[in-house]
Image: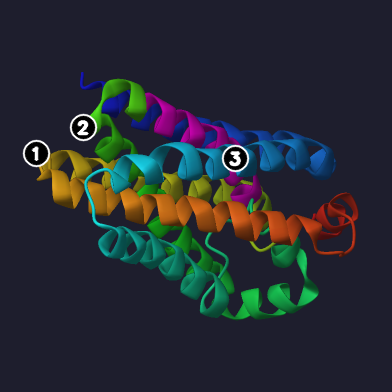
């Protein structure tokens, strides 16, 4: 089997493990979640700044590189600003606000499922694209994504349980995370892109990683009620 496929399947399985963990230890959500989220934010930021963006810049002019990276960042910013947080783990405190839950009852969870599906899809594309450059580079990108997938699956399932039964929330979370496999499938079908277009894709993915790291850090530093108290109030 293609190593990229193994990595994508492992990343998806990690997200599933996070969703299952949310069902098992949801009463201790804050204690379990916080260190995982901070570790994922650190890995995403480091992967973007020191690995993905420099790799993509090698094949692009400065104007094209900035445009490609900024488009990924802007895409996630627009979705997070006007639709729903693109990453429930990175925006856990925002999602816990009563204001969000008021709107969630009007269909916000549907929008969340859609935008997180986009996020997972791009994770799969990113892993497959990085693997096509070099196996070691693909492994590093996979590691950053996989570390993030555990708290992502955890937060997604925890949030879904506020509006659905435990079984329905778990199945929904598992289904949404399968978008990662779909993204990898699309990336692998496009198995031999030109160096230019591959660099464009990687710069775009790097921009999304950078957004997740920046927005998640800002959300974590925003003073709100404690994650533990909030999570308990949702159960």
Residue 145 colored in magenta in the image: yes
Q: Is residue 72 left or right of residue 99?
A: left
Q: Earlier in the sequence, mark 3 or mark 2?
A: 3
Q: Which mark is residue 51?
A: none
* Secondary element type, mark 1: loop
Is residue 178 something one can see in this rendering? Answer: no
Looking at this view, is 12 or 4 the one in front?
Answer: 4
Q: Residue at x 62, y 44 (%)?
A: 41
- Among all residues in the image, which is located at the extreme front? 62
Do the CB atoms of the residues marked 1 and 2 lie less than 8 Å apart? Answer: yes
Q: Label 2 belongs to which residue?
A: 132
Q: Residues within 10 Å of mark 2 (few under 14, many from 20)?
A: some
Image quarter (top left, top right, bottom left or bottom right) of the C terminus: bottom right
Image quarter (top left, top right, bottom left or bottom right) of the N terminus: top left
* Secondary element type, mark 2: helix
Q: Is 107 drawn above or below residue 68 in the view shown?
A: below
Q: Which is the main secondary structure of the residues drawn in magenta?
A: helix
Residue 100 colored in magenta in the image: no
Q: In the image, which residues are magenta?
A: 139-157
Q: Residue at x 16, y 52 (%)?
A: 197
Q: Is 208 drawn above or below residue 135 in the view shown?
A: below
CA separation in Å, label 3 and label 2: 29 Å
Q: Label 3 belongs to which residue?
A: 19
Q: Is 81 drawn above or below residue 43 in the view shown?
A: below
Q: Which mark is residue 192?
A: 1
Q: Earlier in the sequence, mark 3 or mark 1?
A: 3
């Amino acid at each position: 089997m293609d190593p990229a496929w193994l990595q994508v399947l492992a990343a998806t399985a990690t997200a599933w493990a996070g969703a299952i963990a949310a069902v098992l230890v949801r009463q201790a959500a804050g204690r379990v979640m916080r260190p995982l989220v901070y570790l994922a934010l650190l890995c995403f930021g480091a992967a973007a700044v020191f690995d993905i963006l420099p790799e993509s810049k090698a094949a692009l002019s400065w104007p094209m590189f900035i445009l490609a990276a900024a488009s990924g960042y802007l895409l996630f910013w627009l979705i997070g600003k006007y639709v729903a947080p693109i990453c429930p783990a990175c925006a856990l405190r925002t999602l816990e606000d009563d204001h969000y839950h008021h709107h969630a009852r009007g269909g916000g969870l549907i929008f969340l499922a859609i935008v997180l599906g986009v996020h997972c899809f791009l994770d799969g594309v990113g892993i497959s694209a990085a693997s096509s450059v070099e196996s070691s580079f693909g492994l590093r990108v996979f590691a950053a994504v996989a570390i993030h997938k555990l708290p992502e699956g955890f937060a997604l399932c925890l949030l879904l349980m506020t509006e659905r039964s435990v079984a329905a929330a778990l199945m929904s979370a598992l289904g949404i995370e399968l978008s990662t496999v779909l993204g990898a499938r699309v990336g692998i079908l496009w198995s031999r892109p030109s160096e230019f277009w591959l660099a464009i894709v990687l710069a775009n993915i790097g921009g999304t990683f950078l957004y997740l790291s920046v927005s998640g850090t800002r959300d974590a530093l925003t003073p709100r009620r404690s994650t533990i108290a909030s999570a308990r109030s949702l159960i």
